Image (spheres, helix red, strand yellow):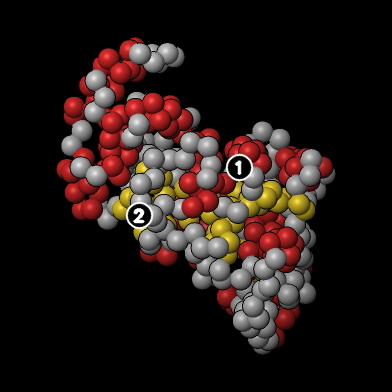
Amino acid sequence: MENRNYYFALSLTGIFSTATCHKLIAAAGSAAALFQAPDSFFRKLKGLRRSSVEAFLKERTRIDPVKAMASCEEQGILWTTLGDPDYPELLREIHAPPLTLFTKGKRLRCGMYPLAVVGTRRCSHYGRRAVEEITGGLPSQVAVVSGMAAGIDGHAHREAMDQGKETIAVLGTGVDIVYPQVNRPLYRDLLRKGTLVSEFPPGTSPQKHHFPQRNRIISGLSRGVLVVESSHRSGSLITASFALEQGRDVFAVPGSIFRGTCRGTNALIKAGAVPVTGGNDILQLWGVKKKETGGKGMTPVSLTEDEKTVINHLSTEEPVSMEDISADLEGYLPMGRLSAALLGLKMKKRLMELDSRRFVLKNEDES
């Protein structure tokens, strides 16, 4: 069996941490030597729990790598190991990189400019708009990396797919597990238009300690990490911390001093993160020139008279409900025409619909 297959087999055992596996591989001389090492090899090493060693010796006898690989292929799951030339080079550089990456969906392509976009699960409409504005200002060769969590992560994936960019979702479960369940529609879309990635074998359920491990891969796959909204204690700041350790750029979106979900990003900026108000801030630091492609905002869109009327009762700052708009119009537009006008404006990307049927107007240069 090739050495790469032993990386695969070691990933299936799930007994030792990735960092410990790297130390043991170095001591044994190769992944193959470690997987086949006798008990006497482990007894010579200090710092290993005897229970972990016994569990590993027992688990490896149960593993049939060839059968496991066939099972992955049947499920449409691909994998790449440290022994493969197509293993992502940026990820290979980090401390204790994953021995194996399991992928599903499109083949993993990070490109030259992968950017991690992360943030709070309880994002505001400001955070969602910031994701749209910043990622919309980036060229197609920028791949968006995130964690498929609710909130900013999920919105970043959706925006990337809408904009025709590559997007990579790094999971804290097996690539065949949907978590959180609210993201099942996003998971299905990523299977068609993006790439799902995990260092955990198929079938692995979510565990609390998996997500910090997942975060180091999000930053490890990327040239930089953009934190959009974040509280003082969040997984986004853990990802930013990994980025600093890995020598990646850290970007942050400035936010309100009164909003709890902006305290983390504002603190990052005070600590030296690059403040970002548009995609060009990232491109300038990376020395990338944006190609003029005639994208967002380049083609004027005509509005109906009803749509023009409704726009005058929307704000770019404060969300307004459909009922409030109707009350402001004092019955000038029946609810059916009002609903049609709102739908038309949404289709023309002139407004954004938030939770509870509330709407906020987009600036013309965002649409």
- Percent x, y for residue 250? 69, 48
- Percent x, y for residue 181? 42, 45
Q: Secondary structure at mark 1?
A: loop
Work out how far the residue at label 2 is from the one at label 1, CA to CA, in angstroms: 26 Å
In-image side of 191 versus 275 (left or right)? left
- Which amino acid does the dot numbered 1 rest on? Gln
- Percent x, y for residue 186? 45, 56
Position of the N terminus, as image quadrant, is top left
Q: Contact, CB < 8 Å: mark 2 with mark 1?
A: no
Q: Residues within 10 Å of mark 1 (few under 14, many from 20)?
A: many
- Give the residue at x 28% y 42%: 3
Q: Which residue is mark 2?
A: 104
Q: Which residue is mark 1?
A: 246
Quadrant housing residue 15: top left
- Give the residue at x 66% y 41%: 244
Earlier-in-chain disc, 2 versus 1: 2
Quadrant housing residue 306: bottom right
- Name the residue nearer the viewer: 60 or 309: 60
- Give the residue at x 36% y 36%: 205
Q: Is residue 122 above or below residue 341?
A: above
- Percent x, y for residue 216? 54, 40
- Which amino acid does the dot numbered 2 rest on? Lys
Q: Is residue 124 visible?
A: no
Quadrant housing residue 295: bottom right
Q: Is residue 191 above or below residue 298?
A: above
